[in-house]
Image (cartoon, helix red, strand yellow):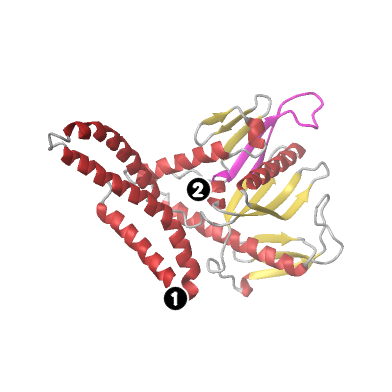
Amino acid sequence: MIAPEKIAQIIDRFQFLEAKMATGDVGAEIATLGREYAELRPVVETVTAYRDLVEQYAEAKEMLRDPEMRELAEAEIPELKAALEASEHDVQLALLPKDSADGRPALLEIRPGTGGDEAGLFAADLLRMYQRYAEGQGWKFEILEESLSELGGVKEVVARIAGEGVFAKLKYESGVHRVQRVPETESGGRIHTSAATVAVLPEAEDVDVQISPNDIRIDTMRASGAGGQHVNTTDSAVRITHLPTGIIVVSAEKSQHRNREIAMQVLKTRLFDLERQRVDGERSADRKAQVGSGDRSERIRTYNFPQGRLTDHRINLTLYSLGQVMGGDLDEIISALQADAQATLLAEMGA
């Protein structure tokens, strides 16, 4: 049974936000209040439905005392009880602690791991997979930096993905993705195993990270790199080095001004992610780490092309629909990962 006081607090807060925004007198708070209001709306709808069922169930129990209404009550009570149990579970999920970064855009970084040229080709396949998934979700997918090999494989790619719930869905993709298949470069038909690493970082906002000018070194240079998409002959490429951490970010678009913007945003996002990892590490030191917040060197998934099989090792999920997955159909995988993360949180909260 969900505490009535908790439900009342949520509804009161929502009504306060609604009244506050209706006055129009919110000033600089408009973005913050608007975000909280939007996040609370589905929660309020869920808890309101639960409260209504609690009242209906109580009324049906009262009807048992009336001989004329008893038969009707006995017919309604089992249905109401089942609906109430399902609604209670929905409320428990709605009240789980939210990751404050879930609604943010994300930076997607893909790099080849072990496997030589084949690893780069697989990294390119992963890039297309995420790009198609983003298109299906109606998200904006923008490649910020891309370096390609002569075979068309990815040496490194950084993309920005913006839209509703981007990080909430993609944050579970960080880790090592392993592929088993016959490479195009293999004439003997032997199956090779190679890998690519994926990192999904919530985009930092200006208030998240403050970078002192004394902590960075900015160098301009001529863009170069075999197969690079943004190669040009001017000294427009920008490299920013964050001295305290040693993080290096390079952007090689045609505009030096744009390169500075991109590089600074990527740097802020990586620093913000470092801080999130530190905080999560402290929080999870005495408990099992959640899916999506573990070591990014961990092998999370295997793509077996000869058998058309995909296995996510964190949740023991195996699908025989590899073609659809590589075509961008990630819904079943992401839903399963989200459900597992929710179940872990519920267990930790003793729900």
Give the number of callouts.
Answer: 2
In this view of the protein, which residue sits in the foreground, 330 or 34? 34
Q: Amino acid at mark 1?
A: Asp
User: What is the magenta range?
Assistant: 172-197
Instruction: Give the residue displayed 58% in from the left and 44% down from the top.
Output: 173
Q: Position of residue 155 (x, y in %)?
A: 74, 47
Q: Is residue 340 above or below residue 105?
A: above
What's the residue at 45%, 39% (across, down)?
A: 340
Number of residues whose C-alpha sits closer than 10 Å to that of mark 2, classed few (under 14), some (14–19) or many (20 or more): some
For the residue labelled by badge 2, is the local secondary structure a helix, a strand or a loop? loop
Residue tagged by mark 1? 25
The relative height of residue 2 versus residue 180 in the rendered view (above or below) is below
Horizontal arrangement in the rendering, residue 273 relative to residue 123 (left or right): left
3D distance between C-alphas at marks 1 and 2:
39 Å
Q: Quadrant of the C terminus?
A: top left
What's under tag 2, amino acid-wise? Ser
Work out whether mark 1 precedes mark 2 in sequence or the reverse, and give the earlier one.
Answer: 1
Mark linked to residue 277: none
Query: Of tags 1 and 2, which is closer to the observer?
Result: 1
Left or right of 285: which side holds 263?
right
Give how far across and how far down residue 175 sits, in percent. Answer: 58, 43
Q: Residue at x 39, y 49 (%)?
A: 94
For disc 2, the marked residue is 293
Q: Quarter holding the N terminus?
A: top left
